Image (spheres, grey):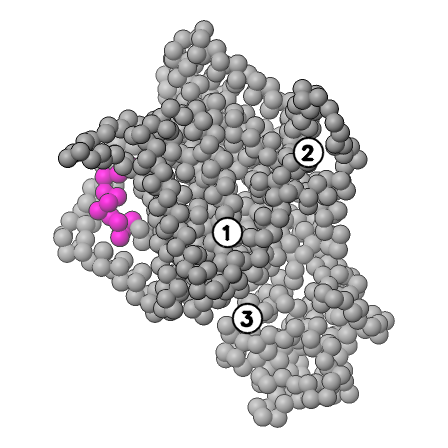
Amino acid sequence: MDTWYWVLEYGKVFSGYIFMMFLWPSVVFYSHLKGRGRTYRFSFCVTVQVVIASTVVLMLGLFHCLHPRVIIVLFYGIFLHALLKGILKHSFFFQVKGAVQKAWRKKREYIGEYGVLAIVLIFGMIYFSYGAFQIHSYGFGDLYTHHEWIYGLKEGKIFSGGVYPEAMHCFIYCLDTLFGIRVYSSLMFLQGIHVSVFLLAGYLLMREIFHWRYTPLLALTLFLTLDVVSADLVYSMFRLQITLPLEFGLYTQFLCAFYLIRYLKSNHRVVRKEGLSRYCWDENLFLFFLSLTAAISIHYYAVIMAFILCGSFAVFLLRRLFSKEHFIPLACSVLCACVIAGTPMAGAMISGTQFNASINWAVGAMNGEETRALEEKTSADKMKKRERPVFAAALETAAGVYMKGYAELYGRFRAGMILFVTAAGITLCFLSGKRLPDWMGEICSGYPPLILFTFVFVALYAAPRLGFPEIISDSRYCSVGHLLLMALMMLPADVGFSVFLRFFRGGILKAVSYSCAAGIYILTILTGRFHGYLFFELSRYNAAVKVTNQIIEEFPKKSYVIVSPTDELYPVIEDGWHEELLTFVTNIGTEGYEFAPEQAFFFVEKRPLQYAQAYFFDGPPWLAKAKYKDIYWDKYAKKYPDTGAAQAPKINASEISEEEAGKDLTVSENSWFSYTRLPDRTILEAKAYDWCRKFAELYPENTEIYYEDDDFVCYYFSQIEGSQYHLREE
């Protein structure tokens, strides 16, 4: 039953996501999208809806009009109006039917390609969603903060944690308001679904890079099957499954680069009328504008990443970039994107709201000190600064980029392969413009920006380890860089298929391409290079989540209080009350300490968890292997010394006892340590368990065990309203 509950919750999030992200804009903007290609419709839907949700919610909040009824009236009202308008024209459904039939007749030849692409995307969704079905915790500590901010929106308060891009929070708020989907469920499952947009946007960009249309399928397959050999890549892949603002917005940089390339490659004419110049504003620039607006609305890092990626392509189109036909409309679109996304934030700051503290952290992290400190703990070969000639310094920096970049991310063997393919690609691009036939230059035309970006990515990763500033902190760029590095490794395949296309029928090569995609999957398994299962940060037992959900469903709102660590606070905040376990244990000896609600539930871990341990999953061998724990923890143990890592089904935990209950709680400036440090947590849980047993003996008629297993127990007691128990030690 528990499994089916989470399957149902996943289905709710998936259905709400499809409606919000695709169905709503498809119906509302039907006239605009009519007759346009699939790429345009996809890009329009995944960007415009994020911008609309963010702008509407934040502007309503800015004017103190944010209320669920207003959101329901706006979104459902506009949707139903557009739907009824189409029905009244007596042609809406016939046009849709005709469009589907036309697309089927025209695109039957691509059914195989789209079928393979769908398989790859579904495989990716299963892989990145798998953890949420194994561990029902948030999965990452930052989600507590994001749940708090979404709860602020539900109370009508925007930027409750300070000014910060809130597009993801607004989107989840709309899912909750329009469909009643629990925020907790959205935070668990949304990114595992949304990762398909990340993969598909990357696929579109690779379609613009490669000459053979099926090479992007091979690159995606390699990305989703080949294992990684560095802790930072494990961490970045882990983040792809967590519903975080940056990961939610990673796809926007691919779309920014994709439509910037198309825009700069297109031809424009200056139309003069009555002495004024009017520049062409085409659909590629429009979608670039929407993608950039969405990026700014979602996360600052997404904007920085977008400019780095776009810059790698624009540098090869500088003449077109700075032509008057292209530059002025492009500059205007960037300005408009900043104004639209920045207006709610600027308004909040004018009204007195300060920047969120994480902005200061991000700015401070750019000096790279945190990364260098971790590097010094895990590596003995530190880079020593000394005076040296410029040429020698350049050579040492280049060697450092190799050792601290390529080799650290991929190991020396794979780093050598990457550099070999990079050198071969550079050579081929150089020769294609001088000695090789013109058709070879056409094949290689998209390679230089890809090669440049992969080098920039590795250099940015290595920069703080070499004493330079850190542009993107904490390995957050690795997932994007890794995807495009896997694309780089497909250059030989793209050249080979493109050359063979001149001598063989396309149908044969298409079948060979599909076979190669299957071959990559099979070969990685047979050679032991198949990717590994990822992890969640385990913060509570699944039983605690299950019991919390049962309490919410069975008892009236605000009729109960749950006594537990902070992890139950936000899941229960709208339905009941929460008391910190530390507060309870500290005050049970205080005269007059009592609870007002009629029912009280005490969550106690009989085997206290090593809090936020990296819990690596295990599962079917066709999906992944259990192999990443040691790779990850060999490095990150230095960064998180108070926690640990475990490989399923093992969980790192201690045992409570009477001896532990008799110990004194450690007094610390940070009370959070009572939960996160295992010795302190063990004492705390032992004291709570000891009190619950004694209280049950004193009041057996009002106390019972609501749930119990080998690891976790929930005690329940009821009291008459107006006659509360004094929770003191007897």
What amino acid type should be assigned to the residue bearing mark 3? Val
Left or right: residue 598 compared with residue 178 = right
Residue 537 appears in which quarter of the rendering?
A: bottom right
What amino acid type should be assigned to the residue bearing mark 2? Leu
| N-terminal-most mark, 3 or 2 | 2
Q: Which mark is residue 245?
A: 1
> How far apart are labels 1 and 3 at the CA level?
23 Å
Which of the two marks, 3 or 2, is nearer to us in this view?
2
Report which residue position mark 2 lands on: 466
**Predominant SS of the magenta segment:** helix
Neighbor class of circle 1 (other Cα within 10 Å; few <14, some 14-19, many 20+) is many
Depicted 235 relative to depicted 484: above or below = below
For label 3, the SS is helix
Does residue 518 appear anywhere in the picture? no
Q: Residue visible at 37% across and 19% down?
A: 506
For label 1, the SS is helix
> How far apart are labels 1 and 2 at the CA level?
29 Å
Residue at the extreme front of the image, as rendered: 275
Residue 603 at x, y percent in the picture: 66, 72
Report which residue position mark 3 lands on: 572
Front residue (pair 650, 362): 362
Which of the two marks, 1 or 2, is nearer to us in this view?
2
Give the number of callouts. 3
Q: Residue visible at 42% across and 34% down?
A: 257
- Report the magenta residues as a range: 26-38
For label 2, the SS is helix
Depicted 137 relative to depicted 408: above or below = below
Residue 368 appears in which quarter of the rendering?
A: top right
Residue 579 appears in which quarter of the rendering?
A: bottom right
Q: Quadrant of the C terminus?
A: bottom right
